[in-house]
Image (cartoon, rainbow, N blue to C red):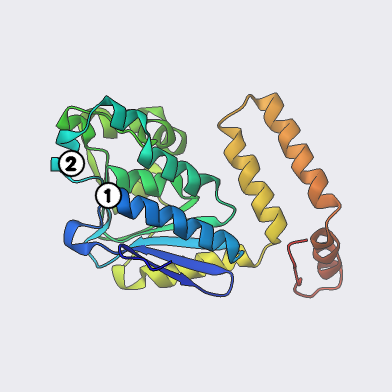
Amino acid sequence: MAYRNIELELGDRVATLTVSRPEVRNALDGGTVDEFHHALEEVRAARATVLIVTGKGDKAFVSGADISSIRERRREDALASINSRLMAAVEAHEAVSIAAVNGYALGGGCELALACDLRIAAENAVFGLPEPSLGIIPGAGGTQRLPRIVGLGRAKEMILTGARWDARKALEAGLVSRVVPLAELMTAARAMAESVLALGPLAVRLAKAAVNASSQMPLGAGLVFESTAQAITFESRDKLEGTSAFLEKRRPRFTGE
């Protein structure tokens, strides 16, 4: 489809999705959310292994909804969980998602980064969940994913004090794994993507599912999930190729089967 609010580049196993509304700090409105869902389906159809998510320009990654729009919303709007369903779709997507955070990531933008599997920040990145300053709470996974990533205490610090974390604070807290100069951000994201691509695609997909499941089920059930996923890989062509390549001292040629 033709997109108005995002740019989608489908490369060789790596897709790049750029939210392109720099005039409003790449805010997520209804139309942008709809386009994002369509783009995720395109990425799935293209069988991309990695999805890099970023924002247009050098000021903002993605911001939440327009404040005037929030002012008019009612309880039915919150219960529709429009943004929350988008973050869940990103989190559950088959591709490994990398958030390349290039500026402000506040509200829904922070929640989008949290929904991604991996996060790299430019030095100018700023993270925050400022919803309580508006008399509301984060509603697209912020109160649920942030504690799982940085711990309960640090999550409470951000949310309950309205704190904004710069890139270095985010790195210290474990919210991001790397901080790089803005000019090097996409290069660093693509290098991380190459690290993912070097692994067995089926193994990566199942490992992502197992890690995600760890926050949603008791340890015993999670271990059963893990063993089941491992059993699938044990019968795969990629396992045979990976072990053969190791023994033959060569690079593996994985097919994802």
Residue at which label 2 appears: 69
Q: Quick one: 191 or 108, which is closer to the camera? A: 108
Spatial CA span between label 2 and label 1: 9 Å
Quarter of the figure that contains the C terminus: bottom right
Q: Is residue 78 visible?
A: yes
Residue at which label 1 appears: 29
Q: Quick one: 24 or 194, which is closer to the camera? A: 24
Image coordinates of residue 115 in percent, x first then y, are: 44, 45
Q: Residue at x 29, y 50 (%)?
A: 28
Q: Residue at x 73, y 62 (%)?
A: 256
Hey, which quadrant is residue 53 in on the image? bottom left
Image coordinates of residue 106 in percent, x first then y, are: 26, 46
* The label number, if any, that marks residue 197 in the structure image: none
Secondary structure found at label 2? helix
- Above-or-below relation of 78 to 17: above
The amino acid beneath tag 2 is Ser
Side of 59 where 52 appears, left or right? right
Q: Residue at x 82, y 70 (%)?
A: 245
